[in-house]
Amino acid sequence: MEAKPTAAAVPRVLVAEDEPDIAALIAYQLTREGFRVETARSGSEALAAVGREIPDLVVLDRMLPGLSGDEVLRQLKTEPATANIPVLVLTAKREQEDRIEGLELGADDYLTKPFSPRELVLRAQAILRRVQEAGMTSGGRILRAGPIRLDLASHQTSLDGEELNLTPTEFRLLQALMERRGRTQSRKQLLEKAWDVDAGASDRIQTRTVDMHVRRLRSKLGKAGHWIQTIRGFGYRLKVPEGID
Ligand code: CA
């Protein structure tokens, strides 16, 4: 049986912006371009939204009530589960220093207000493309995590150099976990990536399906199986211990 390539899931964007008109405009434009958009009106709302589901991109206004955008960015970058989420910062300030500060905090890009919605879409697409390409480079199409080696071209997996027999679903599941190493993914996200379905099944079936395959994958991976961590009430992530590449 041939393994199907991983389905390109609809990218999720979290827009953290307290000005309703700007938030609505950004959401409208991104939705029209095929993104799934969630909005947050304050820094704490943004962090809560990320806690529920890791987005593919955060569009983050610097000036947010309560917790500022900079503080949200700092917290995202400090937490291993969220450190790799790309962030596009919106700033009302024009000073060069602020731009540099934002980039130092770990923003992937910034836009100075006022900006055209079209420009924002282009930047968002460019960031996501870069992230995707980065996940596919490094030695062609081979993913590694310690003793685990995944060859995306030949669909072969090995553990400590020994060939590992994975089902196509297990392969895609492991690929999804390895491509977003260290990042927590919900069962729904994993289902979309590994099963090539739009997660229309009931939550109970989704949970059971993903959990069952994770269990099998863990047992096939032996010791490295423990690296697939259950994040309670959320999903899974591949956490490779420190000191192992
Ligand atoms: Ca604002």
Image (spheres, rainbow, N blue to C red):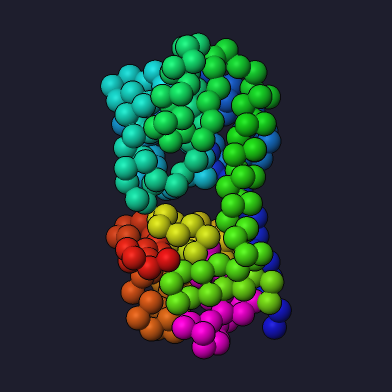
Q: Nearer the viewer, residue 218 or 99?
A: 99
Give the side of residue 18 with respect to residue 153, left or right.
left
Where in the figure is residue 6, as x and y percent of width and height?
64, 63
Q: Is residue 164 above or below residue 208?
A: below
| 168 in the magenta segment | yes
Highlighted range, magenta: 155-176
Where in the figure is residue 167, as x and y percent of width and height?
57, 81
Q: Nearer the viewer, residue 209 or 235?
A: 235
| 162 in the magenta segment | yes
Q: Where does the C terminus fall, quadrant-wise? A: bottom left
Q: Where does the N terminus fall, quadrant-wise? A: bottom right
**Residue depicted at 51% across the width and 69% down the height:** 144
Give the side of residue 160 with respect to residue 26, left or right.
left
Quadrant in which residue 214 is drawn: bottom left
Give the side of residue 83 with respect to residue 94, left or right.
left
Q: Is residue 161 above or below residue 49?
A: below
Q: Is residue 49 above or below residue 111?
A: below
